[in-house]
Amino acid sequence: MTFQAARSSSVKTNVFLSGLFLVTLLNCAGLVYLFVQCNGLRKQQTAMTSRLEELTDSWPMEFISRLSQEDPGWTEQRNRNKRSHQQPKSHAETEDSIMMMTYSRIPIRIFMDLCNSTRGICLTGPPGPAGPPGRPGLDGLPGVNGSDGPIGLPGPPGKEGKRARKATPGPKGEPGDVGPKGEKGDAGPPGSDGLPGAKGERGLKGERGEPYNEIVLEGQRGPPGPPGPAGPPGAPGPVGPPGPPGSKGKSRHQQNTVSHDEAHAAPNDDTLIRRMSAQKAMSTFSMKYGRIIKSVDAPYNVTRIENTFGAWMKDPASKNNEQIWVVEHFSGLTVKEYENLEALRIGSNFKTITLTRYFHGCGHAVYNGSIYYHKGGSDQIIRFPLDGKQAQHMKVENALHNNRNYLFQNAKTYFDLTADKDGLWVIYASSHDENIVVGQTEINEDSFSIVQNINTTYPKSKAGNAFIARGILYLTDTKDSKIIFALDLLKDKPLDVSFDLRSSNDTLTMVSYDPYDHTLYTWENGYLKKYGLHFLLAE
């Protein structure tokens, strides 16, 4: 870049010097021409002076010779000595002659030549009337350039000219002295997110700690053993004495939930509880179609909102509820509530809901009459009832939640909340190994908490977004174009599933599953879209 600038500057300098040399050469030629013309004029002036002197010496003889050459009538009239003998002349002849004291007439032109040749000796009469203008003469020779005059007063400032090209920067100067340290300024606003850094080297293996966010995976069930021989029937025994009263039993709802301590208990206990919960969940699905997605239809555009980031949701706990909630941007306090899909398309007649705390991200969810969202700058999930009741908080232990170390970089989301018919799930990244963890929640009337955590062992850096459909977690690639990972949350088993999700390159900030119309809801660079799903047949 510097070489090209120097070369351009050298060309400009050569052009300027060439022009200056040409102008100087033209000036020298002009001076030589003026010098030659001056010498010619000087010679002509000398010749005219000599001619004038000759005419001065010879004018009497020329005058007499001109008189002798006049016409006979004029010679005869000149010999007369009396006025009475003069004959009258015409008016035209009178105007061309003049009366002299010698009683003689001579032509006026001869008298004028005589006066002009005597250098002012003859007296002249009053000037006659101005004659008609003569023809314009030839242009004279150019005069010699005059000397420069004095510098005049400065004139008014001219109009502002065009901006000149920026000159090439000069050489870098020497650094100055270090100034005194200034006072600490106020903290500026947070800057825009930078590009993700390169993946660091794998660290040393740590010591085995106590299990917390992990579960003990159930091993494969072995083949059944051979049946044993039937024993002989025994005789009925006597009726025993009545036993002591038993302890108070659990309700059906409590029997199908798992506490946080039970999630990390011995394998036999945890396996039994989760198996009962999985059997209940799988019984709600259709017997004709299975739980695994086979393919995705082309998208259907619902409407367009002027915001790159956002989310739109329905309540899966209420089948006949057509209300839709819209949250714009990845940080704020307001939520828009529309009566139905048509009202959302029109973009009017909505209700504005103001939250108690700022939300962050695009992973919100609506479930059973409450909005669930991540409280910005913290590791807490807030439950905001839509009926005006007091909001509730839930802390998620060992979850990444700040410093822009997002769960999903494209959506600027730390916690992705998703709901289906059977409850609410919390997807987050573990602060221990940055793997994606799915937490199953238990929601009561006065509180809610995570009762089971499933570590997918899949790193968040390879995922773009996620959704849960019929108890199966699906993860997209970093471009959100295809599904690259699936995990059966009810069986703790990864699935060999891969299919294209979309062909658009727009920023995908939110995706969720509607269990009633079996579609995916997405927010893609302000476009609200729906994708139809096709499931594999049940086995």
Image (cartoon, grey):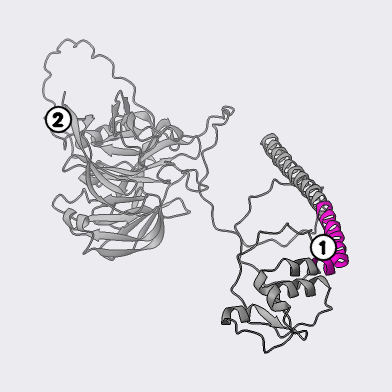
Residue labelled with disc 2: 289
**Type of the residue with mark 2:** Tyr
Residue at figure coordinates x 69%, y 61% from the top left: 184
Cα separation between marks 1 and 2: 107 Å
Residue at figure coordinates x 65%, y 73% from the top left: 73
Is disc 2 placed on a helix, strand or loop? Answer: strand
User: Where does the C terminus fall, quadrant-wise?
Assistant: top left
**Horizontal relation, residue 57 to residue 283: left or right:** right
Q: Which is the main secondary structure of the residues drawn in magenta?
A: helix
Badge 2: residue crowd in 10 Å (few <14, some 14–19, many ≥20) = some
Q: Which residues are magenta?
A: 39-62
Q: Horizontal and vertical percent for residue 450?
A: 36, 45
Q: Earlier in the sequence, mark 1 or mark 2?
A: 1
| 228 vs 346: above or below | above
Q: Is residue 52 magenta?
A: yes
Residue labelled with disc 1: 147
| 81 vs 474: above or below | below
Q: Is residue 198 magenta?
A: no
Q: Horizontal and vertical percent for residue 145?
A: 78, 59
| 517 vs 288: above or below | below
In depth, the one of 452 and 174 nearer the eye is: 174
The answer to which image quadrant residue 338 occupies is bottom left
**Horizontal relation, residue 515 to residue 331: left or right:** left
